[in-house]
Amino acid sequence: MRAGRLLSVGRFAVLDTPEPEPEPGEVLVRVAHAGICGTDRHLLKGEFPCRPPVTLGHEFSGEVVALGEGVSSHAIGDRVACDPNIACGGCAACLMGRVNLCERLVAVGVGRDGGFGELCAFPAHRALHLPAGLSLRDAALAEPLACCLHAIDIAAIQPGERVLVLGGGVIGLLCVQLARLAGGEVMLATRSPHRRRIAEDLGAETVADAAEARAAWPKGADCVLECAGVAETAREAPRLAARGGRAVILGVMPAGETVSWEPFDWLFREVSLRTAFLNPFTQGRALALLASGAVRAGPLVTREIGLDELPAVLSEVPGPSEVKVLVTA
Ligand code: NAP
């Protein structure tokens, strides 16, 4: 079969590879749609831990085509979305229920072969059934939405609070929708006029950058969600929070890169800084929100490509009108 593989840092190619066989407890899924995530680009550049060679792709949906020994939870033909994060269940973090912090966490599409291939085998308990009426295309956004849900849970947004989202990629635009659902007054900072239009259509105010956000909300935001993963927005996030407010970092900055912050400012304004990593127990809710239409995936999918186009698209910086690119079988 064909698969898009990270061969080493900076080298990604679509190659012929052997078809995977499901191990006991696993399902084999024919991939329908697989999203390109900002993290895939970090992986290509060596900015996120990974051991190549590996087939990338951790946001995908598809149909079950074979069952490993002992699988009774699924049947051939089931429509599923992959929750890629496989926790060990036995380390101290797992035993506290903090599975996203598992010491032996392995992610499909990062630490083992993922969804940028025609077929992917992974544990059946990570193959979540699609609710009735949800398309395989929309379900490909369940994983990033689940990560955003975890951040919104941590942010604990109250109705009427001011929420500032930094970065208008898919993570930013999903957070915009969730913060609106939580009852927040939402503003997105994005440099892209195209993403501004999408955000406005989703009910948010928009500004171009942190300076404009400060001018619009001089007292700051009750909650700032950092969704860009660059030094500038990470530095600005706590500074843009109001007195007593909070900043939640979702963006992944390259490992080893540092940012200068002013703890005095956090202390005197009692700003709390939180981080949100992955999707612990949130992907089922993400599927339900997509199925009900409460969160809209449609406006965020700006391009669908074939597997052979993936190496070029992955190595490009996303264009200003790009949000989510799906690799579609
Ligand atoms: P994306 O589509 O590439 O979007 C990144 C956004 O960052 C862009 O839309 C851009 O915003 C903004 N940006 C880039 N450079 C900037 C700069 N110099 N100044 C201001 N803004 C800048 O990526 P994504 O898929 O939305 O992911 C966003 C981040 O979240 C990535 O770092 C990704 O790795 C991370 N992530 C984290 C989790 C988690 O669990 N915490 C899960 C998934 C992804 P504008 O062009 O709109 O201004």
Image (cartoon, helix red, strand yellow):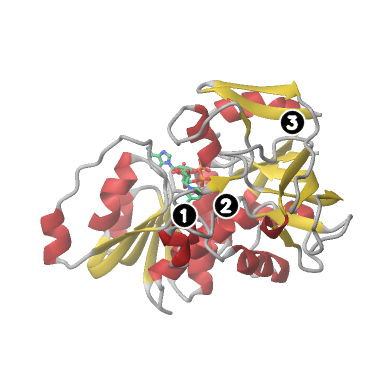
Q: Relative to the observer, which residue lies in front, 43 or 19?
A: 19
Q: Is residue 130 left or right of residue 227?
A: right
Q: Which mark is residue 102?
A: 1
Measured in 3D between alpha carbons, the distance from the residue under mark 1 to the one under mark 3, in whole angstroms, is 32 Å
Q: Is residue 93 left or right of residue 170?
A: left
Q: Relative to the observer, which residue lies in front, 70 or 6?
A: 70
* Snapshot quadrant of residue 194: top right
Q: Residue at x 52, y 28 (%)?
A: 44
| Residue at mark 2: C-beta within 8 A of ligand 1 | no
Label 3 sits on what residue type?
Answer: Leu
- Asked whether the residues under the numbered discs 2 and 1 touch, taking CB atoms below 8 Å apart as contact, a structural biologist would say yes
Q: Quadrant of the N terminus?
A: top right
Q: Which mark is residue 307?
A: 3
Q: Relative to the observer, which residue lies in front, 276 or 299?
A: 276
Measured in 3D between alpha carbons, the distance from the residue under mark 2 to the one under mark 1, in whole angstroms, is 10 Å
As drawn, 111 above or below 246: above
Q: Is residue 265 left or right of residue 127?
A: left
Whether residue 232 is visible here, answered yes or no, is: yes
Measured in 3D between alpha carbons, the distance from the residue under mark 3 to the one under mark 2, in whole angstroms, is 23 Å
